[in-house]
Image (cartoon, rainbow, N blue to C red):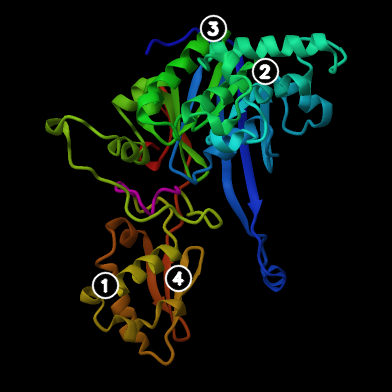
C-alpha cells in the first residue's frame, strides 16, 4: 500500500492509563492495603497524523477497545493526556466536549447492539444532526424545513455508503436489515457529522467473509473522499494488512511494537508480533512453516506480570525479563498436576495453596515437612523449568523452617528505536 500524504498530528496519547476498580467484599477492602484495579491501559503513547490509518492490534482483553473509547472521551483517563488537533482534551467536559465530538466519532463492534431496535434506520442515522444541529445553525428543530434538510442529508449519506435503495430502507427497522446493511447504517451515522477522526472498533469482525472486503473498500473510499483519519482496532492482522498504514501491537495494556505496517509484516521484531503473524492462515500448504505459539493464557490484568508482560508466555524470554515468585508457583502447579512428573512431590512440597508469593519471592513454611528434603525437591523441579526462569533465581534458601526462592530484579524495560519502529523488548536493549 502506498503511503498517504500525511497532514498535521490529529490525535496523540501521552502515557495514557485507564484503570477500573475491582468489586470486592467490604471486609476484604478494609484488609487489603492497596486498592485493586484492572490495568486495562497502562502507559500507552502514540500519535496519528491527519489522513493516516493506524491499526491497533492485539488479542481480546488487551485493552484496545478501552484505548479507542478513551481517545474519543467515552471513558475518562485515570492519568496521562489525550490531545486532539493540538488541544488537550483529557479533562474537558460539558459543552466543550459535546462540541468536540462532532469532529471525532466511533463505530462499535456490534452493529446489532449499536442500533436502537425501536428506531427506524433513517431516524437513527440522522439522530446526530438533531443532537448537534450540525451545519444548520440555530434553527427551530421542529420546523418542516429542518426536517426536510435532515432527511435529504440522511438519504444522501445512505446512498454514499451503499445502503440502497435508500428511500425504501429509510423507514425500515434494524430487524429488517442484514448484518452488512446494519454495519453500513452505523458507518453512515458516524459519517453524517463529517468528523475528522473515526475510531473503528472491530468494524468488520461480525460480518460474513463475503462482504467483509466490500466494507473495507468502502472505508477506504470514504477516507479518500472526506479526508478521514482512522484508528482501526482489530484482532485480525490479515484485515489490518489490507487497510492500515501503520500498526501498533498491543498486549495486556501496553504497546509492544509500533511502526509501518509493511515493515512489521515483512520483519516483525517483538516475539508477540511474531506470534500474532503465525496464526494468520497461509492457503498454500507448501509455504506453511512450523508455528511457535505462546504457551499458557493471557495473565490477570489486575496483577500484571512484572517487567515485560509477555514474558510468562514468550518463546524468546530472558532471565532479566521480570520473573517473580508467582511464576515459580504457576510452574509448580503445572508440575504437580502431571502425575507422571510429580510423583510424591506434593507430599514433600505440600499442596500448592500453602505457597506464598510476594514480588520476587516465593516461600513455603516447611513445618512439619522436612526442610532439607523440600529444598532439594525444589531444585529438582527447577531443573525442569524454562531455562530463563531457572537462571533468574538468585537463591533457594531456608529461614526459620521456611523455604525461600528469591528471583533477581528485572532489567528496566524501555521503548527502543529499532530502524523505523519502536519496540518494547529487552532483546533490543
In the image, 98 versus 249, the foreground residue is: 98
- Above or below 280: residue 334: below
Q: Residue at x 57, y 46 (%)?
A: 40
Q: What is the C-alpha distance between the residues marked 4 and 1?
A: 21 Å
Residue 23, position in %: x, y? 66, 61
Q: Main secondary structure of the magenta part?
A: loop
Question: Can you identify the residue that label 4 sits on?
Answer: 362
User: In this rendering, would 248 be left or right of 172?
Assistant: left
In the image, 350 versus 73, the foreground residue is: 73
Look at the numbered discs 4 and 1 and tell me whether their residues touch, using CB distance below 8 Å.
Answer: no
Q: What is the C-alpha distance between the residues marked 3 and 2?
A: 20 Å
Residue 395: mark in rendering: none
Question: Can you identify the residue that label 2 sits on?
Answer: 85
Q: Which secondary structure, mark 4?
A: strand
Q: Which callout, 4 or 2, points at the residue further toward the start of the chain?
A: 2
Residue 338: mark in rendering: 1
Residue 225: mark in rendering: 3
Q: Residue at x 24, y 76 (%)?
A: 339
Q: Which secondary structure, mark 3?
A: helix
Quadrant in which residue 95 is drawn: top right
Q: Which callout, 4 or 3, points at the residue further toward the start of the chain?
A: 3
Residue 295, position in %: x, y? 32, 53
User: In this rendering, would 150 be left or right of 16?
Assistant: right
Viewer-nearest of discs 4 and 3 = 3
Q: Residues within 10 Å of mark 1 (few under 14, many from 20)?
A: few
Q: Residue at x 32, y 40 (%)?
A: 275
In the image, 345 versus 194, the foreground residue is: 194
Q: Residues within 10 Å of mark 3 (few under 14, many from 20)?
A: few
Q: Residues within 10 Å of mark 4 (few under 14, many from 20)?
A: many
Q: What is the C-alpha distance between the residues marked 3 and 1?
A: 60 Å
Q: Residue at x 67, y 60 (%)?
A: 35
Amino acid at each position: 500500500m502506498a503511503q498517504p500524504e500525511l497532514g498535521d498530528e490529529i490525535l496523540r496519547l501521552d502515557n495514557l492509563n485507564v484503570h477500573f476498580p475491582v468489586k470486592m467484599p467490604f471486609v476484604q477492602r478494609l484488609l487489603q492495603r492497596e486498592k485493586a484495579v484492572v490495568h486495562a491501559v497502562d502507559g500507552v503513547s502514540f500519535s496519528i497524523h491527519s489522513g493516516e490509518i493506524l491499526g491497533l492490534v492485539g488479542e481480546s482483553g488487551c485493552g484496545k477497545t478501552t484505548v479507542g473509547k478513551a481517545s474519543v472521551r467515552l471513558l475518562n483517563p485515570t492519568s496521562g493526556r489525550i490531545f486532539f488537533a493540538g488541544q488537550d482534551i483529557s479533562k474537558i467536559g460539558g459543552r466543550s466536549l459535546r462540541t468536540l465530538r462532532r469532529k471525532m466519532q466511533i463505530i462499535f463492534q456490534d452493529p446489532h447492539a449499536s442500533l436502537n431496535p425501536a428506531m427506524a434506520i433513517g431516524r437513527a442515522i440522522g439522530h446526530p444532526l438533531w443532537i448537534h444541529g450540525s451545519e444548520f445553525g440555530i434553527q427551530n428543530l421542529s420546523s418542516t424545513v429542518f426536517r426536510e434538510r435532515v432527511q435529504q442529508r440522511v438519504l444522501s449519506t445512505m446512498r454514499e455508503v451503499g445502503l440502497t435503495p435508500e428511500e425504501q430502507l429509510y423507514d425500515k427497522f434494524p430487524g429488517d436489515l442484514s448484518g452488512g446493511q446494519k454495519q453500513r447504517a452505523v458507518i453512515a451515522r458516524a459519517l453524517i457529522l463529517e468528523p475528522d477522526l473515526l475510531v473503528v472498533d472491530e468494524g468488520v469482525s461480525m460480518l460474513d467473509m463475503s462482504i467483509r472486503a466490500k466494507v473495507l473498500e468502502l472505508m477506504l473510499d470514504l477516507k479518500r473522499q472526506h479526508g478521514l483519519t482512522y484508528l482501526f482496532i482489530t484482532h485480525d492482522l490479515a484485515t489490518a494488512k489490507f487497510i492500515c498504514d501503520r500498526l501498533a501491537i498491543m498486549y495486556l495494556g501496553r504497546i509492544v511494537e509500533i511502526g509501518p505496517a509493511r515493515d512489521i509484516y515483512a520483519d516483525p521484531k517483538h516475539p508477540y508480533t511474531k506470534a500474532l503473524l503465525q496464526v494468520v492462515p497461509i492457503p498454500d500448504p507448501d509455504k506453511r512453516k512450523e508455528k511457535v505459539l505462546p504457551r499458557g493464557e493471557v495473565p490477570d490484568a489486575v496483577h500484571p506480570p512484572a517487567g515485560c508482560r509477555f514474558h510468562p508466555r514468550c518463546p524468546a524470554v530472558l532471565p532479566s525479563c521480570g520473573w517473580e515468585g508467582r511464576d515459580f508457583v504457576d510452574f509448580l502447579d503445572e508440575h504437580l498436576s502431571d502425575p507422571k512428573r510429580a510423583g510424591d512431590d506434593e507430599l514433600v512440597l505440600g499442596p500448592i495453596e500453602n505457597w506464598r508469593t510476594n514480588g520476587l519471592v516465593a516461600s513455603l513454611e516447611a513445618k512439619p515437612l522436612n526442610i532439607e528434603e523440600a529444598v532439594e525437591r525444589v531444585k529438582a523441579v527447577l531443573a525442569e523449568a524454562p531455562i530463563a526462569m531457572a537462571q533468574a533465581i538468585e537463591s533457594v534458601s531456608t529461614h526459620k523452617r521456611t523455604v525461600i526462592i528469591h528471583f533477581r530484579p528485572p532489567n528496566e524495560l524501555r521503548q527502543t528505536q529499532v530502524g523505523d519502529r519502536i519496540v518494547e523488548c529487552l532483546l533490543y536493549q
